[in-house]
Image (cartoon, coloured by chain):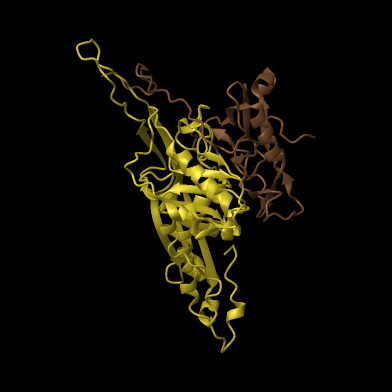
Chain colours: A brown, B yellow
Amino acid sequence: MSPTSKKSEPRDKAGTVAPSAVKVKSGLPEVQAGDKRARYYVGTLPSCPVQNVTVGGISFPRFRGNPTFDDRGRPDRELDFGIFIDLAEAEVSFVQKAVSTRVLRLLGKEPEPGKDDPERTPSRRRAAIYPIDGKNYHHREGDQPLGRFLYMHRVDAMTAEQMQSFPPEAMEEE
Amino acid sequence: MAGPIILSGSTLAAGIRDDFDITYRPTFDGVIDSLKDAMQIDVPQTVRTQPFGMHETMPYPELWNEGEEGIPTEGTGSKSFNVTAYTYAKRVQWLKKDREDNQVGDLRGKAQALGQHFASLDSRIFFELLTNSASLLPAIPNAPDGAALYSTTDGASAARFGVSSGNLLTGTGVASSATIETDFFTAIEQMGQFQDTKGQPYWNPAVDQERYVVYFGIGNLQKFTQAFKGVLIHSVQATTGAGVSNVVLASGVQVTLRPTSRITDNDWFVFRADSALKPTFSTLRIPLTAAEATEGNSDAARNTGVEYVQWRVRKGYGVNVPFGTVKVNN
């Protein structure tokens, strides 16, 4: 019997391992077999009161991996922010359009100053995301474009400096 | 004694009646029951930060030409993650003289209702896990695969569960019951194609796949009720004018609807109710306990005339590998 270490790689003789992704109807635009995909770095900025946002069929997470947090929100290890995802051009356009039609509304009261470290931990401020064309949405003062809180960068267009620095620029154009 | 107290001024007048005293008392009957298909409640936790571990899928048999050297051999991986228990607590205090003069029920007994409100904790945090708004947790935990509860990819940027969009589905909106019905079947078809870590279908067809729970914003109640409970969905065929039958009802798939005001947008969530694996869980480190301060046991109460009751529980919350749920993102 082969060893079962944490990283043991099963052999692929029968071709049953290393699952290849099944394509499902996702609501995302159709991507043809020849369409090239590029790798994107996506996530929510520390200023985003919603830790993980799903919009346009993809997830914008605050961090990846499995850190734990103490009562004050301090993680037990360095956080790996955001996630990498391969997207075709049509999917990128779809996501961008979806983000541009969402707003974020802050709920509840302001957090106490100094209670959270915005660079390291998610804000405890509650918020809701609304599609501006949704039947339950009525504009309120203070609603902010969702793109202000998300980032989405094509990895091969990022400089080494950009790769090293955090947080990256928001999706919203100035 | 510092801190706010129960203001009893409106309940002290002689002859006042308490017929409407239940007005501000929400009920929590059935709260835990309503979560049981989506959250495993009170998994025992024995230390502050509890490690949990799991093996990935064990290998499947292969064809072996016996006599050839080397029986097919294969290993597998494992995953571990930690859950930290947090303390949830609250105190309510009142003036002793207010308790003595109170005309509306028993003030001390009323304060004990705070304990009942702890029944809402699992429910409130469950919806924080769904909506990613962390007010009762320092951060929303990721699943053991390193990605958020709903994600197209896992933490290593591979298609989650071997499906191109993971457990996230871009819906077609909630404007009509027909789109909801279509998205529901797309969601369960997507879930049905999830693969284990050896590339085999995760869901065994022998398992009953006929029961689902759907959580959605109560603002969309009418359309969801039409989509899942209506004999005819609210659309007609353009050519004949005939009503279109409800495929959910016709198929025999059982769907329990859980509308909630805690979901404020058009996203909705499908959970497999028959799965032993629940996508979310709570742990229990220290059960709920109460402490009461009165003149009989507290210097502070004797010094100030302020009495109180406080409750405390220590619990943790986490996300398991979410094979059993798909989010419809609108």
Q: In this view, does A149 lie to the left or right of B54?
A: right
Figure quadrant of residue A37: top right
Q: Where is residue A164 shown, x and y percent of the image?
A: 65, 22
Residue A71 seen in the current view: no
- Pick the quarter of the image with the N terminus of chain B: bottom right
Q: Which residue lies furthest to the bottom in this view?
A: B15
Q: Residue furthest right?
A: A174
Q: Where is residue B106 shown, x and y percent of the image?
A: 48, 78
Q: Where is residue B257 shown, x and y percent of the image?
A: 49, 57
- Tell me if residue B107 comes above or below residue B242 in the rendering: below
Q: Residue furthest left?
A: B67
Q: Residue at x 68, y 55 (%)?
A: A135
Q: B177 or B240: nearer the eye?
A: B240
Residue B319 seen in the current view: yes
The number of discs equals 0
Q: A141 or A130: nearer the eye?
A: A130
Q: Which residue lies furthest to the front in this view?
A: B240
Q: Where is residue B196 shown, x and y percent of the image?
A: 39, 32
- Tell me if residue A113 comes above or below residue B121 in the rendering: above
- Tell me if residue A141 comes above or below residue A48 in the rendering: below
- Pick the quarter of the image with the C terminus of chain B: top right
Q: Which residue is drawn at 55% across and 80% down?
A: B20
